[in-house]
Amino acid sequence: MNYEVDFEKTLEDAFLSYSASVAQERAIPDVRDGLKIGLRQGLYAQYTGHLTHNDKFQKAQKSVSMAMSQSYVHGDAAMYDTFIRAAKPFAYRYPLEEAQGSYGSPAAPDDQSAPRYVEMRASELSNYFFEGLKKEAIDKWYNNYDDTELIPTVFPSIGFWNIVNGSSGIAVSFSTSIPSFNLREVNNALITLIQNPDIEPEKIYCPPDFATGGIIINEAETKQSILKGSGAPIRIRAKMEYDSKNKVLVVTELPYGVYTNTIMEQLKTLTEKNENYGIDKIIDHTKKTAEIRIYPTKGTDITSLISRLYQDTDFESSYPVNMIMLDNGCYPKVFSWKDACEAYITHIRDCKRREVRFDLKTAQARENILNGLLIATANIDKVVSIIRKAENKEQASAQLISTFNFNQPQVDAILDLKLQRLIHIEAVKIEKELADTRKLIERCNELLTIPAKLDNELIKLLREVSNKFGDERRTTFKTEEHWNDIHTRTCGIIIDGVKLRKSNAPQAIQTPNDTPIYLFTNKGRMYLLSKDTLPDTSRIVSPDNYIKMVSGEHTTCIALTGKEAQYVCIMTRKGLIKKMELSTCISNFKQTTLLIGLAEDDDVVSTFFLNDNETIFAVSHNGYATRFGLDNVVPVQGKSGRGVAGMTFKSATDYVISAEPVQKDYDNLVLLYENNTIKRVSLSQFEKQNRGGKGVMTASTGTFISNTFLINSKKMTKYNNFPLRNRTERGDNYDGQSVA
């Protein structure tokens, strides 16, 4: 007999079936509990096998064996890797397993002992997956591979959503990549969403928070990726600080997924290939957390070295964002941040309702029993007599039902009691328990009929988990334009970490590869300078060579895009301050635009990006300084606006010499005088004033200022050679090189 087979159709069906099985049974987490099926099966095996947080540690081999015998089908090595990864604090933001023994470290993540040498159990946090199982919170179960046990399709996970740990997996033709988040922040966002379902997604946004910390440098792009569920990858840098006293660069946090063994190999390769790289020696002090000490060679520019390290090693890495999860356990779907939160809330509401129904059913059953016991105590002699005279349990049951109109559960409860206990049972205790039971029934009915009361219970659970397990953020943020804290007034533009060299340009910045550069001039113009137009050279270049300026025009400020800022602010020589919406300035902006209409005898001193909550610090040539807020005292103006008074002067010959925003970590003001002296003053000596004030003195009479800038004294340690002074004290002599 001949059979015709449509191979194309057969292969298509087989491929689709295989793709679905990989996604559902291996690679993709469920949006409801955030777990892949393998870890869920492992945790459930520990739950049924009494290996939870409340139980003793057992050999990891036992956990693996229980999971294998119950439902897991992918091999003992894969199961052990799943268990042990869930115990690693540098892999899981909130570990779901507790382990004792050698099971890897940030220095060697895969250096783990065999399962017979490691002890483990489910963590305390995992209990929030299990609690609801006792109360039928899950209504869908499936048979294991030999039909001997039922396995939950999903965990209730009320209060703890495993998405905080992130997830990654490769399915057929697509992959998922979900970063980890801060538990406290996520639960606060969920509470807000429960209370206000129509809230805008941006208001419940939670930035990623990785187990290993690190610094996210593209916060704006990251936010959009998380809100949409996919998009630009998260760019993360290691946290490193230069210890000027010991002359060592200390790395204390690494990007997620980057380990010190990899970094050490990369550094070894770099130094072997290039003896002049700028590194003398490297020592790895990593134990439970990362700690790498890099000793630069004598004369190495630290800023340049740091830039090269970010460029040449995994000290800077990226984490893709592709939040694909199983929708209700079925089909893969890209979830936006709000969609994922809503899916979880829907899940825990359903689970909580089932729990309440279980409690209601249990309470009603107990109420029925208590009513029967109450009748029995009121007629104790007759009840005892019937029981004693009956030849068997069935006869006693029938007689009690016919005499007192008991139902079968009530009779069973009475007959199950020992006769002596029945005689001595107290009606007062029954009435007390009955009253409590009826209150519970009333409460359960309210929870099932009044949605707000059920939501309040969920909110209470979310807060409970946050209070118990929540912690502070580990991953911080820093925008790219603020990376270098270069407070020298020498030079032009640094390209890709090239060593800074002196020039007559007003300011230096370091730019990433794809970031446009904005230049602001003394005539109030803004120019866009593409990095692609600049030469690839270590020589400092002047922006004046690449843009067309009018007569008398020169660059006063160079800045990056200012994506995190809301406003562009301009401070003029005559003390005017102008605030403009950043979006207004850069909309349809191609090459150049005029930001302010200046008087003929006025010039722009400084231009900068900032937000409403920031303050501005301005200093005049005669040594007066003022500090004022940007919020409601400086109105927003259009391009035609000329600004408002930001600073006034006691002398007609005085003028603004410098102005800049006060960043959070700034604590000192450095003043450079025309008589070759320098002074460092604490910013705490300058209180916030109203806009338009004359300010307070910073120098003795007759001393004129040539330049000023704000610093963080902990980072800019070279200025600490000059002692802190009171505002009106004289400065210290300098040779012109000390602050270069």
Image (tube, grey):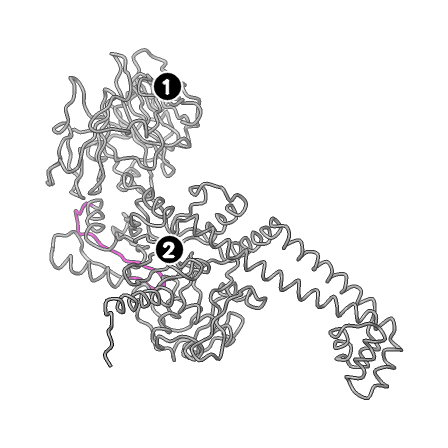
Residue sitting at x 31%, y 19%:
622
* Above/below status of 298 relative to 711: below
Q: Residue under circle 1?
A: 647
Horizontal side, residue 61 vs residue 410: left or right: left
Question: Mark 1 vs mark 2: which is more N-terminal?
Answer: 2
Q: Which residue is mark 2?
A: 333
Task: Tell me the chief SS of the magenta region.
Answer: loop
Residue 614 image offset from top left, x and y in percent: 39, 32
Q: Position of residue 50 (x, y in %)?
A: 52, 75
Say what amino acid the circle numbered 1 marks.
Met
Residue 297 counted in the magenta span: yes
Residue 163 screen position, x and y as percent: 42, 57
Residue 603 figure quarter: top left
Q: Quadrant of the N terminus?
A: bottom left
Count of numbered badges drawn on the protein: 2
Q: Which dot, 1 or 2, sits closer to the camera?
A: 2
State the separation of the CA atoms marked 1 and 2.
Answer: 56 Å
Label at residue 246? none
Q: Is residue 679 visible?
A: no
Magenta stretch, residue numbers: 285-301
Helix, strand or loop under label 1: loop
The percent coordinates of residue 241 (x first, y second) are 29, 49
Identify whether 288 is placed above or below 551.
Answer: below
In the image, is residue 123 part of the stretch drawn in magenta? no
Does the CB distance between marks 1 and 2 fall below 8 Å?
Answer: no
> Dot 2 lies on which element?
strand
